[in-house]
Amino acid sequence: MQSTLTLPEPGRLHVAIIMDGNGRWAASRGRPRTAGHRAGARAVRRAVEAAVEIGLGTMTLYAFSSDNWKRPACEVATLLGLLRDYLSEQSGSCLEHGVRLRVVGRRDRLPADLLRAIEAAERLTEGCGRLTLRLAVDYSARDAIVAAASRVGPGGASSPDRESFARLLDPAHPEGGAVPDVDLLIRTGGERRLSDFLLWECAYAEILFLPVMWPDFTRAHLEAALSDFASRERRFGALSRAASA
Ligand code: FPP
């Protein structure tokens, strides 16, 4: 299905999503939290399909935060298993639709099967250029910034500026250049916080908090969010068009 939405910068927009509400979605149905995460994985597939058709440039999804290790072991295992399955099962479809998969975050604590799935999916879709789908896994924005800062100095970039520092934020993909700034950050599930997600990249992001629980998120929600985004005037610290006229 083609989109009728008019984007301000087709093919260039970066939308990031904090996919919250899986647990409450499940609880409201009397089901275990893991059922909510499985439904959440189905919503991920829908969102990626919609992002391709709408013409986004980059979409970053918060799949597993570094603080999520504090959850019960069976929930952690379910989440990491869903990620592995998503990467293994969807990488062929991503290739077909021009979606380049990238995983951001720490890799040294991930199970070997997930690591293999990440490496295989990234390799397979390396040449795709329609949409870059970034999955944040074992991700903490503050840790990413601290790690980038530790790469500054002797042997690394000295006296970095914003642009060159941003290139240090995703060391797994140095060839990818600077991580693009987020244009629109969406958080589902009704909570209003950033939860250590893309703190550098969201410096000038427009933010939208939606009451919908992530498993219920559809293409219509994404389109409505983008319409809202398109109606906002982004000033980046300068004056509004009206004030400077
Ligand atoms: C937050 O909801 C969601 C997560 C911690 C994980 C997000 C994971 C998925 C959507 C599924 C797997 C991902 C992929 C990419 C296949 P919560 O559990 O904190 O919800 P609650 O606030 O209602 O408890």
Image (tube, rainbow, N blue to C red):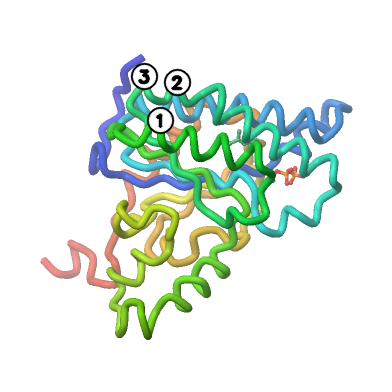
Question: Secondary structure under badge 3?
Answer: helix
Q: Nearer the viewer, residue 152 or 199?
A: 152
Give the spatial CA distance, label 1 vs label 3.
11 Å
Q: Quadrant of the N terminus?
A: top left
For the residue marked with disc 1, what is the amino acid? Leu
Give the spatial CA distance, label 2 vs label 3.
6 Å
For the residue marked with disc 3, what is the amino acid? Glu
Percent of width and height locating residue 118: 53, 39
Q: Nearer the viewer, residue 50 or 129?
A: 129
Q: Nearer the viewer, residue 91 or 213?
A: 91
Report which residue position mark 1 lands on. 124
Report which residue position mark 3 lands on. 96
Viewer-side label of 1, 3: 1
Report which residue position mark 2 lands on. 92
Q: Is disc 1 surrounded by few (<14), some (14 to 19) or many (20+) residues within 10 Å?
A: some
1 or 2: tag closer to the N-terminus: 2
Q: Which mark is residue 245?
A: none
Question: Secondary structure under badge 1?
Answer: helix
Q: Is disc 3 surrounded by few (<14), some (14 to 19) or many (20+) residues within 10 Å?
A: few
Percent of width and height locating residue 147: 51, 71
Percent of width and height locating residue 66: 66, 58
1 or 3: tag closer to the N-terminus: 3
Query: Vertical placement of 153 versus 34: above or below?
Result: below
